[in-house]
Amino acid sequence: MKTTWNVLEEIVRAYPGGLSSASISNQVAPEVIRESLKKYDFGKPLPLDLLTQEVSDLFSKWSLHVSHPGYLGLFIPATTEASVVADALVALYNPQLAVWSHAPAANEIESHVLKYISGKIGYPEPETFSNFTSGGSEANHTALLVALAKQVPAYVNEGVCSLERRPMVYMSVAGHNSFDKIVKNIGLGLKSLRKIETDDTWRINLATLESQIESDISAGFRPAVIIGTAGTTASGAIDSLPELAALAKKYNMWFHVDAAWAGAAVLSKALRHHLSGIELSDSVTIDAHKWFSVAMGAGMFFTRHPEAVQVAFGIPAVYMPSQAQTEPYATTLQWSRRCIGLKLFMTLAEKGEEALIAQMEYQCKLTGHLRDRLTASGWKIVNDSPVGVLNFTHPQVLSGLISADDLRNRLELGGEFWLSTVPLPRHGKVLRACVTSFHTTEEHLDRVVEQLNDQLTNYSL
Ligand SMILES: *Cc1c(COP(=O)(O)O)cnc(C)c1O
């Protein structure tokens, strides 16, 4: 007789090994899934062992398997075994991190790992503050709230309406769209977000940025925040961080670095220099659920201005066991707080930093391999990212014979690979590949090139 835990153990053990022979995705209509869920009417209880197997079968059949070696997609990693174990332990103990005294171990574990990453960023201890977030989006949201608390303190009590000069936020057009949502949510409005054009390497154009700041000052606005992106989603471009830091200083602005994907590279001696200048920032976003290969959602926010965090989030609550304004509920966007950091702590502790670094460096080498193979068969590479994102197109795409989307869709139907397309200025829609699964090898990449070439041949026949 198998227990639920036997069933779960079998599922967890079998999943990674079974991936390469399984289809990466299955096309399915929502009605089909809804039909199969009808039997769960919550009328009569079901045994957990059976339910566990059934839910696993549903996930297995109807998911895009992002851990699959053929997943060359959007910064979603294969997850470490340690993250699976960590999330199970968190669900079991259910530590409430809102106040330290409710979850001393969990709170200290999170602080411990955050201090380690903060040190790698190059922030000076102890004048820093950091916390885990649901993801990069919440970390970016936190950054803007803290930046406003510092730059325009009246915002906190009087609200945005009280400000004589409209605070302006600057990032490149290639910056993350979470900021569009954030400026809408925090009362600034989309008009406060200036999207600056990029140069030929998809980095923010510094000259355009500075002249926009100057003309905004003349127009009576208050340039408040510069966002540098370290690893743009479309092209993996890293803005010129030291130059952005200098501009922010010159105009007395807050400098935030959105390094959701590429930030993990602060650990690697070989890759660190691509992020140089990140240590000059006022705040940083890094997602643990991206290049650190832990399960979602796990973002991180870092700042060198703990006092601004207090202004942004400080709030007394009489019913809380402690009113100390250093408690997590009074220093972060969330209230009840799940232990997010354990999966990063356990992943780092189990593998050791060297193995994680080697993994990231290997994935960059794999991108190099893919670049070489594509070039050798006539594809054109249109970017030069140091953090593993490849944009490419083909003369047949450029001449309009087949679209990048068509190619992509045909490739996906083969069941072995998933990659995306993205529109790029001057190139139209191009293909985008990024190695995010630690199961991916050179052989898989040889095969994706083979399949892409086959699609082209099929199409021209
Ligand atoms: C992924 C990403 C985000 C959004 O982070 P989530 O974890 O999806 O909330 C923001 N910025 C960049 C550069 C990203 O890569």
Image: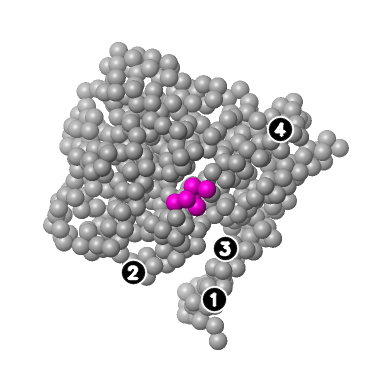
Which circle's residue, 1 or 4, is located before the other in the chain? 1
At a point 54% along the width and 68% down the height, the residue shown is 12
Disc 2 designates what residue?
93
**Foreground tag (3 vs 4):** 4
Q: Single out the mark in the foreground, 1 or 3.
A: 1
Give the prevailing secondary structure in the magenta stretch: helix
Identify the amino acid type marked 4.
Thr
- Residue neighbourhood size for the residue with mark 2, other residues' Cα within 10 Å, grouped as few (<14), some (14–19), many (≥20): few
**Amino acid type indicated by mark 3:** Phe
Q: Residue at x 19, y 46 (%)?
A: 314
Q: Judging from the image, what secondary structure is the residue with disc 4 in?
A: helix
Q: Which residue position holds label 4? A: 375
**Which stretch is magenta?**
353-358
Find residue 226 and report its horizontal and vertical position in percent: 35, 28
Earlier residue among tags 2 and 4: 2
Question: Per the image, is 144 magenta?
Answer: no
Residue denoted by label 1: 7
Three-letter amino acid code at disc 2? Tyr
Amino acid type shown at disc 1: Val
Q: Which mark is residue 59?
A: 3
